Each structure stands twice: as C-alpha cells, then as structure tokens.
Image (cartoon, grey):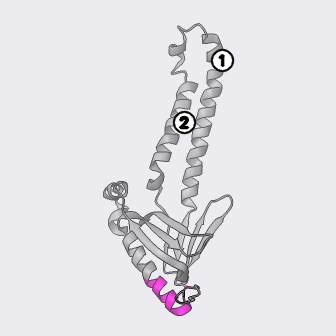
C-alpha cells in the first residue's frame, strides 16, 4: 500500500536522558582528572580510596557514554509509518522490533500536546515549518498490540485527522472484524 505519512520522534523527547548521561560522564571525567583528590586527602582512608578513584572515573565515564549512545541510536532508529491499511512502528536497532496495527482495528485515536512539548516547539526552528510537537496514542481492538504511542512527532493533530480518515475508510471497506451477535435475550 502507498504510504501517506512517515515520521520519527525528535531527539528532544529524550533530552532529560541525554543530560543525565552527560552529567554521569562529566563526573567520571572529573574523577579521572583528579578534581576530587583534595577532598579525600585529609581523611584517614585516603590511600585506600584514591587507588580506586581512576577505576570509578573510567566506569562512570564509559557508562554515561554508552547510555548516551543507546538512547540516541534508539530514537534515531524509531520510525512511524501510516498507510491506508496499516500503522507501523519500527524501533530497536538491535532486535528490529516492529509493531503493526491494521487500520480497521483502530478503536480510538488521541492526540495531545503536553506543556513540555509546547515549550520545545517555541525553541525549535523546525517546529515553525513542521508544526507543533506532540503525541498520538492509538488504541486498538487487538489484544497483542492494544496500544501504540507515537511520541514526539510534528503536527500530532494533523496525524490524528489522517488516522481517523483512514480508519473510517478501512472500516467501510473491510469491517471491524468483530462478530455482531445481536441483542441478548
């Protein structure tokens, strides 16, 4: 089927993670460079602690850097695709996880623009040409993939409208796949 919308989340959705990783890496680098050595000199256990400080510094630096790469690559490889028949989410660069929801199985679509996304939209120059940042939550009738959230996408209200149009067209074409047994009696 022909793709009608394609997008991916912005890296601003993980800004808190990135800042935390940078702080951990900077702390590790400060320990490596000996910034905390004067704090330990007056203490009686100085010789024992100072011997382990380089290992602690390297560990913090490497952990922070690896987590920073993990979060960045994970966002980079997340893709959303909307076609008239399917909604696809591709993520996870290691395992290649893919979630698919058939359009005629969509029960509800909710779009939201939280405060932190509104503030980021004011700061980002790309938001002026691509629309506001926000999230679209899709609730499905399927039990395996009952909910899918497209977080940090541009123009969530436009995507919601597109999803609702495709959902109605798919229901008219294929039905919902539910069996109607009529009134109970």
Question: Residue at (55%, 30%) from the top-left corner?
Answer: 29
On whether residue 175 falls in the magenta region, the answer is yes
Q: Is residue 155 visible in this depiction of the protein?
A: no
Where residue 134 appears, as percent x and y from the top left, is 40, 63
Where residue 168 appears, as percent x and y from the top left, is 46, 86
- Against 34, residue 178 (above or below) is below
Q: Residue most toward the right?
A: 95
Callout 1 environment at 10 Å: few (<14), some (14 to 19), or many (20+)? few
Name the residue carrying label 1: 51
Name the residue carrying label 2: 25
Q: Is residue 110 visible in this depiction of the protein?
A: yes
- Against 43, residue 152 (above or below) is below
Q: Quadrant of residue 64?
A: top right
Query: Which segment did they paint magenta?
Result: 165-177
Q: Secondary structure at mark 2?
A: helix
**Inter-mark Cα distance, 1 to 2:** 20 Å
Dominant SS of magenta comes to helix
**Nearer to me, 156 or 72:** 156
**Nearer to me, 6 or 166:** 166
Quadrant the C terminus occupies: bottom right
**Nearer to me, 21 or 151:** 151
Callout 2 environment at 10 Å: few (<14), some (14 to 19), or many (20+)? many
């Amino acid at each position: 089927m022909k793709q009608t919308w394609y997008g991916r989340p912005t890296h601003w959705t993980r800004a808190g993670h990135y800042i935390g990783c940078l702080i951990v890496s900077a702390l590790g680098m400060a320990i490596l460079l000996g910034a905390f050595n004067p704090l330990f000199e007056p203490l009686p256990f100085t010789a024992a602690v100072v011997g382990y400080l380089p290992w602690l510094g390297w560990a913090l630096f490497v952990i922070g850097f690896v987590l920073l790469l993990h979060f960045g690559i994970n966002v980079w490889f997340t893709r959303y695709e909307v076609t008239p028949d399917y909604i696809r989410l591709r993520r996870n660069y290691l395992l290649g996880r893919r979630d698919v929801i058939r359009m005629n199985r969509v029960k509800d679509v909710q779009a939201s623009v939280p405060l932190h996304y509104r503030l980021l939209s004011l700061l980002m120059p790309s938001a002026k040409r691509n629309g506001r940042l926000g999230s679209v939550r899709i609730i499905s009738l399927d039990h395996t993939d009952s909910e899918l959230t497209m977080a940090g996408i541009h123009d969530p209200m436009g995507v919601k409208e597109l999803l609702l149009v495709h959902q109605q067209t798919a229901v008219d074409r294929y039905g919902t796949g539910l069996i109607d047994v009529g009134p109970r009696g």
